[in-house]
């Protein structure tokens, strides 16, 4: 065995272990699949052990590989902290910011804010991850996250910037066919668009004293953009932020006086990245823009 190990080989090993394949590791590190394979092979040769077994589902750690990962994992985390600290000390306002937000916020809420930011700071490039999946700020999957819940990760700073009211909507042609509900209980007799696995709407009904389950929704999807388009198309009733729903001419808001829970909006960034002028500029601009709506 060599006296010292190549850190790039260890980094590739960690990525392959985390993603379960050479291709997944290559995407994560911005490399190529053959390079990942060479790094793993070189590490196995240096150590004189086999680190992965090939399975139908990809690559699985051997017991020796799992033991090595226990030691290499903290090294990777330490390297990430070094990179975060280095970027945090950067004084340049130009550069790239990777931003993550839910699909519906990324589609309907952020474009106007980001376009205005671009006019003021043309040297800042934005990478937007439109996903309802939780991105890990500590591993640099994103620099800034827009969340509809309070982030609780260690080493992450978070600021609540807004409360977005929610309304109930339906297309005009649907209401012409099915009638307009006059109470929350009336909704039980209507077609309703809901989530597939998400429990938010079910919990909202429960808070209002109405018990429903997943089968109540005649159309189910966890993609909020797709759900909204089904409401606009006339499938049935649905829920959305009032700033989105009130701006759609094809739908009407029903039961406007009903007290629905609002959506809290939080901004989050790694505590060390917040010291970057570029991250701080985008973070503060987003906070102001989201608060204004």
Image: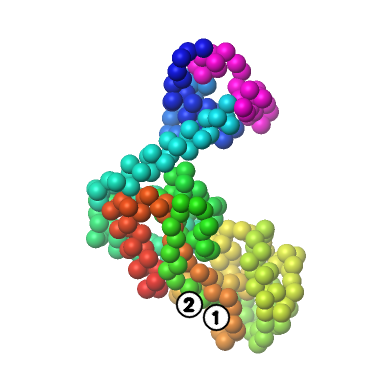
Q: Nearer the viewer, residue 237 or 210?
A: 210
| Residue, disc 1 | 253
Q: Determine whether 247 is above or below 20 in the image.
A: below
Position of residue 194 in the picture relative to residue 286 (left or right): right
The quarter of the image holding the C terminus is: bottom left
Q: Which residues are magenta?
A: 41-67
Q: Position of residue 158 (x, y in %)?
A: 44, 60
Q: Is residue 42 one of those drawn in magenta? A: yes
Query: Is 139 situated left or right of 52 in this image?
Result: left
1 displayed left or right of 144: right
Residue 221 seen by the camera: yes
Between 246 and 134, the one nearer to me in the picture: 134
Q: Which residue is mark 2?
A: 246
Residue shown at 71%/82% (left/top)?
185
Query: Where does the image place residue 13, in percent across and percent down from the top left?
Result: 52, 27
Estimate how packed mark 2 is, as few (under 14), some (14 to 19) or many (20 or more) residues with alpha carbons within 10 Å: some
Please tell me whether residue 184 is drawn above or below residue 275 in the rendered image. Answer: below
Residue at x-position 36% and y-position 59%: 283
Location of residue 229 with respect to 83 vertically, above or below: below
Disc 2 and disc 1 in contact, CB within 8 angstroms:
yes
Q: Secondary structure at mark 1?
A: strand
Q: Residues within 10 Å of mark 1 (few under 14, many from 20)?
A: some
Q: Secondary structure at mark 2?
A: loop
Q: Residue 18 or 217: which is nearer the viewer?
A: 18
Cα distance, mark 2 to mark 1? 7 Å
Q: Which residue is depicted at the point 38% across and 49% down?
A: 272
User: In terms of sequence position, does the residue under pointer 2 or pointer 1 come before the other?
Assistant: 2
In the picture shown, does residue 281 fall above or below 210? Answer: above
* Residue 69 included in the magenta stretch of the image: no
Judging from the image, the colouring scheme is rainbow
């Amino acid at each position: 065995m060599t006296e010292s190990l190549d850190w790039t080989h260890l980094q590739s090993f960690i990525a392959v272990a985390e993603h379960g394949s050479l291709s997944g590791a290559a995407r994560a590190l911005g490399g190529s699949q053959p390079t990942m394979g060479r790094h793993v092979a070189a590490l196995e040769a240096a150590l004189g052990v086999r680190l992965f077994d090939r399975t139908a589902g990809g690559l699985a750690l051997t017991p020796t590989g799992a033991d090595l990962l226990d030691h290499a994992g903290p090294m990777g985390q330490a390297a990430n902290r070094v990179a975060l600290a280095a970027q945090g000390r950067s004084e340049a306002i130009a550069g790239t910011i990777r931003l993550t937000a839910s699909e519906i916020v990324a589609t309907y809420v952020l474009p106007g804010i980001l376009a205005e930011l671009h006019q003021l700071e043309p040297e800042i490039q934005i990478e937007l991850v439109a996903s309802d999946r939780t991105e890990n700020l500590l591993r640099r999957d994103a620099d800034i996250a827009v969340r509809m819940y309070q982030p609780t990760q260690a080493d992450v700073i978070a600021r609540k910037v807004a409360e977005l009211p929610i309304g109930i909507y339906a297309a005009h042609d649907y209401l012409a066919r099915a009638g307009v509900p006059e109470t929350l209980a009336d909704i039980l007799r209507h077609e309703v668009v809901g989530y597939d696995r998400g429990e938010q709407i079910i919990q909202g009904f429960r808070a209002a004293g109405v018990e429903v389950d997943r089968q109540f929704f005649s159309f189910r999807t966890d993609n909020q953009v797709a759900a909204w388009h089904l409401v606009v198309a006339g499938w049935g009733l649905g829920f959305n932020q009032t700033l989105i729903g009130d701006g759609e001419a094809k739908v009407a808001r029903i039961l406007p006086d009903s007290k629905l829970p609002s959506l809290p909006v939080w901004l989050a960034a790694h505590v060390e990245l917040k010291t970057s002028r570029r991250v701080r500029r985008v973070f503060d601009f987003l906070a102001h823009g989201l608060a204004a709506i």
